[in-house]
Amino acid sequence: MHNSTMKQHRLPWVKGSLLLLCLLCSLTSKQAFAWIYNNLDCTNTGSAGTEDLGTLRPSEKISINMTANCIVKRRFPYGSSLQNQQSYTLGKGDKFEALHINSNQKVPEQAMGMASTTCMPSSCETLAVGTRFSYNVKFSGVAPATSGNYTVSLGLSSTSIKGYESYIDDLNVVLLSYTVVQPACSMSTNSIQNLSFATIANDDLANAKEIAEIKLNCTRAVQATATLNPTQSAIKGSPGVSATTLAGLSMAATWADNSNAVNFNTPRTYSFIKGDNIIKLGFQPSLNVGATPTGSFSSNYTLNVTYP
């Protein structure tokens, strides 16, 4: 009977010990996965908050820079790594690429708390309390090809590395909104045109003239502007006249539909109709006073046509 009594006293003690150990294990597990914030104190100096990009064309390039000045508030034993998070809250488009300019390394898209190999300031290193540094992360993407309204959220975060992944910080979130609109017009001629004057004598320059035709097709009637810019220097006091690559020879540019001299860098307004439209430019070489040049020449221009 004595042995039986002893066994009855030990069983509750063993059960109680097992229960206590399980509780301790549970508490230890929860502490290991607790997130620790406010490890960095960063002041944004670049894109932040909500940005309205307005109207974009299909596949137009988009880029923003998230920049900040930071102070370390809690020691990073091995370094602070970067991650980006992104999602479209309106519409659907391609992913943005994030590049850490300081290290020239890509910032991977992954959840905060998952360490990457891209670290601040420019490499993975111990960061003592009070350390100051700045970062610059460029997000690059393109607008979708389909017309519509779009909103994309771009986030940047920091996660400590090598066993200290519970040290995390939200660094920045930028909300980009924009509308993609199909352009009203498209160019139906080659974007580069070469005009040849062949061989001409100085006495025949008055009859030497070439016409460039730029054709555009528009899906609707629109207002447009056209601006002509010479590559060679413009001749002061002579509207539409610029130098050529041959000393003593100039080139005069006119709007061929009305023979008016082109005012360089000054937009001319056009009322385009639905369907085909043509911009015509005339080019005529002319001798400078007292000059009798010989040799090859070229003259280059850029025509900018702007429409909705």
Image (tube, rainbow, N blue to C red):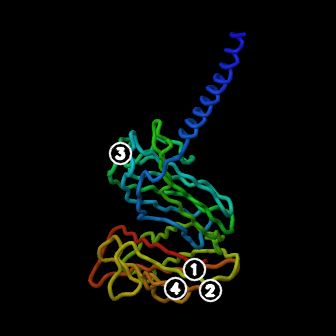
Is 166 left, or right, of 88 in this rendering? left
Q: How many marks?
A: 4
Q: Is residue 167 above or below residue 12?
A: below
Whichever of callouts 1 and 2 sits on the residue coming sooner in the sequence is 2
- Residue at horizontal 55%, vertical 86%? 269
Residue 127: mark in rendering? 3
SS at mark 1 in the image: strand
- In the image, is residue 259 above or below residue 104? below
Q: Mark 2 or mark 3: which comes first in sequence?
A: 3
Residue bearing mark 1: 279
Residue drawn at (65%, 19%) of the image: 10
Q: Quarter holding the C terminus?
A: bottom right
**Residue sitting at 49 percent across and 67 percent down?**
194
Q: CA distance from mark 1 to mark 4?
A: 11 Å
Secondary structure of the residue carrying numbered label 4 = strand
Q: Amino acid at mark 1?
A: Ile
Q: Is residue 138 left or right of residue 93?
A: left
SS for tag 3?
loop
Mark 2, residue position: 271
Q: Which residue is mark 4?
A: 268
Q: CA distance from mark 1 to mark 3?
A: 62 Å
Which residue type does callout 2 highlight? Ser
What amino acid type is highlighted by mark number 4? Arg
Of badges 3 and 4, nearer the viewer stands 3
